[in-house]
Amino acid sequence: MSAAVRRRSPCGSGQAVSGEARTHTHTHTHARTHTHARASSAMQPGDDAEVPALNDLNNNSSSSSSKHRSGAQGRDGFRNQQKDSEGSMESPNLEFEYGDTDSLTAELSELYSYTEEPEFSLNRDYFEEDFKSHVKGRRWVELSVDDQRAYVMRLLDALEVTDREKRLKVARAILYLAQGVFDECDLEADVLHWSRHNVFLLYDMGIFTALLELLSMEIDNNQACSSAVRKPAISLADSTELRVLLSIMYLMVETIRVELEDDKPEWRTARESFKTELGSPLYNGEPFALLLFTMVTKFCSMSAPHFPMKKVLLLLWKTVLFTLGGFEELQEMKVRGREKLKLPPLPEDSIKVVRSMRAASPPASAMELIEQQQQQKRGRRSRRPLVKQDSLDTYNERDPFKNDDARDEEDDGEDVDSGIEGEVDPLDRDVIIQPPPPPPPLRPPTDRVSFPKGLPWAPKVREKDIEHFLETSRNKFIGFTLGNDTETLVGLPRPIHESVKTLKQHKYVSIAEVQIKREEELQQCPMTMGEEEVEETPAEILYVGMLPSLSQYVIALLKLLLAAAPTSKAKTDSINILADVLPEEMPITVLQSMKLGIDVNRHKEIIVKAISALLLLLLKHFKLNHIYQFEYVSQHLVFANCIPLILKFFNQNIMSYISAKNSICVLDFPHCVVHEMPELTAESLEAGDNNQFCWRNLFSCINLLRILNKLTKWKHSRTMMLVVFKSAPILKRALKVKQAMMQLYVLKLLKIQTKYLGRQWRKSNMKTMSAIYQKVRHRLNDDWAYGNDIDARPWDFQAEECALRESIEKFNTRRYDKNQNSDFAPVDNCLQSVLGQRVELPEDFHYSYEMWLEREVFSQPIQWEGLLEAQ
């Protein structure tokens, strides 16, 4: 390793690279530049020249001419590709465990921007000033619970004063209590302990309801809104009251949401009651989440640009997570739902299966492929390159697709796709460059070949797949079909009987299929089926509240996601999401500028994290509640250009994004309020933390991939959108992240479009094909790998979406538009019974009865002709 040079990998750890390899890398600079310039101009799915955007997103998506853009992207793309290719051999396995949220400490620290740090001492000073004037000689932690309750009651009364400044001081004192009276604590654990104790005390005393009234007042404060609209630059000072109120509410929701083993029984009761309150229409006749959605839409419509959007989105996400439930609760609800519908149990627990998967090595980059092709032409390619043990050919199996003649594959090597998309294991590069080394000593066969016990997922078959298989078989063997009959096998050969038996063994009926069938019956026979009994679940209550303005909510969230995405360029007319991070006085030193730059990047990452988690939760809960609720939200996302937006997000150096170090540990809460603040230097800011990856960024990436999967699954027209927007190379670059769950969702997205990418792409990407086979669930008669008869299916985006939209509108009208059901209401034609009905009249009606008769009856001429015509 004497000739080795040390360099920093994208994940922060130094790696050794031989000088010979680096020299060889530079010999292919020209070829790499030329190839990647072509690739980068072809791989811009999120660019607005290709995306037919809605007007709502056009303002944020317009850009300069495509010629100028492609040139700049070619240069940037070359640099990114070089980083990607250098990192492909070095990226380590990421020890990341996916969950609903990060640790409680991390989630609390992300609530505050680093520019808000001086306000911690401000909150403490206001609390101590008030506390010492009422409680002499004692500290908060020394008070009995009764004394603490009495003091909180006094603060609650003070919140109702009309003086705005006094109210703000009291709110800051309450915030200090919710933050854990950190000045009286020596350890971070003590801060969290007292924060938890105080939050449950505040909830018990009714603080949350009082805060909600104050928040509603601030939202409706037209003077503050108009003042913010006129300001050329908005800073932290414009949202002080809102930030304090939202911070207290977030601390209460997040702290009460997290359940600990040593919680008191009364705390567990309080948690359930708070959960019910947040999810019920108790606040102005609508759930609390709808008030926050209203704040989001007001902000995005530019009528309230001072709203602290990061805090609003975090509180909205945690409120939905708390009231609807996380991913494990979703799994339990799914199991209960299947039992209720008398469906077979799930074949496996998907959460456990994904957690048990291991990551695979990423596919090769374009630079490595070019080197491979040049070596092939020079005749220096070794017969069998060495392969990593955990490469995409997992379990050391030979690739099942490698039966093609090797010469055919080489002949096709000059195709454009293979130049960019071909595959070589990252370790092949040294084998190509150097003479083949002597073979390593062979290990015992039991160590060398470790076949898996089985595939991770049980195969599934839909009812319509069995029907399609039987229809094809009957046409082939007996010349006619029997419709949807899957039982009659007369006239079919024995192998078809065996095939049908196997298909039925793996038949899977989803809750969505049952719901669709039930909805069709209700639409066809409204009188016979009667009125549907709709269970008032939290998801149902939220959907009913969101329904009138759902499109506005979706577009607003996507606008914020677009503004916070790292691939978005700043535009003069885009929304300003930095209102709650920019200080009043801009930095004047290099150190202050670096700190603010880190804070801004961290701020954007947290917004992406909150929006991605929120959208995924809504999609999953609405899908379980009713499939057409899910389809309605999905269609709004698709029409608002969510698919190209997510692809645009991934069209970056994804390894750099996941390993970004936009955090300053010593400034994170609660560390910054307990420990002495060390002197910050430019070097310490550049170094960042020692983490291998950024949890929130990896979490966001997985969420966005899951959303993309939800939108495109079983939707032919949306799958074709992935193909048209050239998503394959973008998704393939995401495989560089060695995290099993992220790779699984990337492979799922590649699988659904594989048949449309052409034979050459499949031949050039055999390792990716093998990984799909090994990691993604199989549909027994899904011809995903070969693409036979794909030309027979026309791609009519409008027809498919319109048919789906029609079904959704029928569902919404039948279930939620009560006025439309008047045609089916029974009419009483008997004069006696109509006149004999009791009519509820107001209490004071008998006082003005004679006047009413004179005005409404005697003084009104009767149009007898009109009455006769009406007959």
Image (cartoon, rainbow, N blue to C red):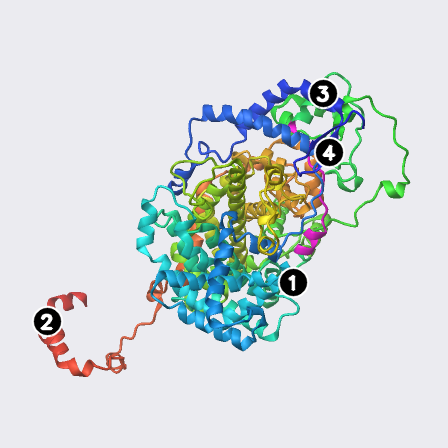
Q: Nearer the viewer, residue 281 or 166?
A: 166
The residue mark sitting in front, 4 or 1, is 4
Which of marks 2 and 4 precedes in the sequence? 4
* SS class, disc 2: loop
Region in magenta: 351-366
Which corner quadrant of the image does residue 864 belong to?
bottom left
Report the Cα–Cα distance between label 1 and label 3: 58 Å
Identify the mark at residue 263; answer none if there is no mark: none
Verify whether residue 358 appears in magenta. Answer: yes
The mark nearer the N terminus, 2 or 3, is 3
- Between the residue at mark 3 and the residue at mark 4, the CA separation in whole angstroms equals 18 Å
Q: CA distance from mark 2 to mark 3?
A: 99 Å
Mark toward the viewer: 3 or 4:
4
Please tell me how crowded label 3 is: few (under 14), some (14-19), or many (20+) other residues with Cα within 10 Å. Answer: few
Location of residue 310 in the rendering, given as x and y in whole percent from the top left corner: 48, 50
Circle 4 residue: 15
Quarter-of-image position of residue 507: bottom right
For marks 2 and 1, give the CA distance.
Answer: 67 Å
Label 4 to label 1: alpha-carbon separation: 51 Å
> What residue is disc 2 on?
860
- Residue 24, label in figure: 3
Q: Residue type at mark 4?
A: Gln
